[in-house]
Amino acid sequence: SLGRRLGLGLGLRPGLRPQPHPNPSPYLGLGLGFSLGSPRMSAMDIAELKKVAGYKAIDDHVESGMKVGLGTGSTAAFAVERLAQKIASGELTDIVAVPTSEATKALAEAGGIPLTTLDELDAPLAVTIDGADTVDSQLNLVKGGGGALLREKLVETRSDKFVVIVDESKISPAGIGVHFPIPVEIIPFCYQSTIRVVERLSSLQAAGVTATLRLGNVSNNKKDGDEIAITDNGNYIVDLSLAQPLADPAATAAELIDTVGVVEHGLFCGMAHSVALALARSPRLAPSPNPKPGPDPQPKPAPKRGPRPRPEPKPKT
């Protein structure tokens, strides 16, 4: 089940082992063992879950001397906040970070985080911490709701480790494409023609695709203006809503990237090493407390019972 996959190592590449939390709870996010909230979550509850995930990812994965990638979005912002706190307190030293967007760059600079670029580094980043708009049971991701998918993918593919931070609202048992539209970054030249070509891709047609050019603020896929949204790279974004989940997200990713006019897409398949998942106390997502990956535990056999004692014969009267 999805709940069991979440609790038993969802998001770990082969060869990587989950690190159990020293005080695990019954509500495990990849062995991280934290939970809060309630089954009916308000916006404040969700924000608190995002904060827990962002803070915990920094606490668990960032050490002094590291070069770190900083993601974009509401959850990643909490990771930036936590990193700034630990640098300011002296708990972390000799940290250099690479932001994945102009918005994250401004946030990091305001927090006093030393920044660099990939061009200035001759080795991969130690870790990149970023959020996601969708995570499915196979650890396929949809990213780019904040408009930074190209830079995010650049930074995350040049990292030794990519840690995804999400709250439970980002989990999609149904699969990829129905929980959140898939963003695709395209060049402005002949963009309408490119959108038509994308809509005709076989895997997207089979899933019942509807393509919508992003208007207004590039950092969300809700129309909040009439002007075409422009990415940090000067491109447009088209959001792909699906009537059915993708049958093979990796195959769709290959179709998209082979389309002339497409710069990058928001399908991140096989990239994440682990997920920091903040769960509310909801039984529908409560996984097994066993943090080790493996098959579902078999029920214990009933204890064997000895022969029932014979009743003593009643005396004759």
Image: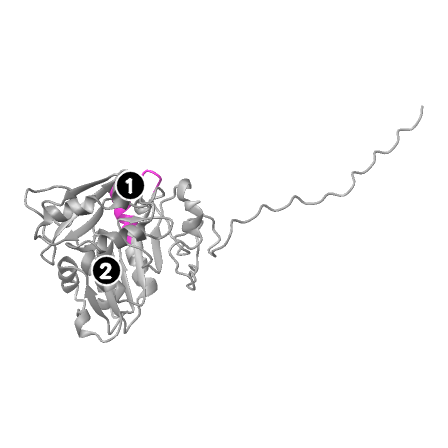
| Residue type indicated by callout 1 | Ala
Crowd tier of the residue under label 1, counting other residues whose Cα lies within 10 Å: few below 14, some 14–19, many 20 or above: some
Eye-nearest disc, 2 or 1: 1
Instruction: Give the x, y percent position of residue 199.
Output: 20, 44
Work out which residue is located at the far bottom of the displayed protein and give it.
122
Question: On the image, which quarter does residue 13 sit in?
Answer: bottom left
Q: Quadrant of the N terminus?
A: top left
User: Which of these two is toward me, 162 or 142?
Assistant: 142
Instruction: Give the x, y percent position of residue 74.
Output: 21, 51
Instruction: Give the x, y percent position of residue 203.
Output: 28, 45
Q: Which residue is mark 2?
A: 153
User: Which of these two is toward me, 315 or 81?
Assistant: 81
| Residue type indicated by callout 2 | Lys
Which of pointers 2 and 1 lies earlier in the amino acid sequence? 2
Work out which residue is located at the far left of the displayed protein and give it.
227
Q: Kindly report the distance in space between the C-alpha atoms of the residues bearing marks 2 and 1.
A: 26 Å
Instruction: Give the x, y percent position of residue 228.
Output: 8, 47
Q: Secondary structure at mark 2?
A: helix
Report the residue at 19% width, 47% height from top.
198
Report the residue at 27% width, 64% height from top.
157
Residue 107 vertical position relative to residue 90 in the rendered view, above or below: above
Residue 298 vertical position relative to residue 109 in the rendered view, above or below: above
User: Is residue 81 covered in magenta?
Assistant: no
Q: Quadrant of the C terminus?
A: top right
Region rendered in magenta:
38-51
Query: Is any part of residue 16 visible from this angle?
Result: yes
Question: On the image, which quarter does residue 57 sit in?
Answer: bottom left
Q: Which residue is mark 1?
A: 206
- Are the two marked residues, 2 and 1, in contact with CB atoms closer than 8 angstroms? no
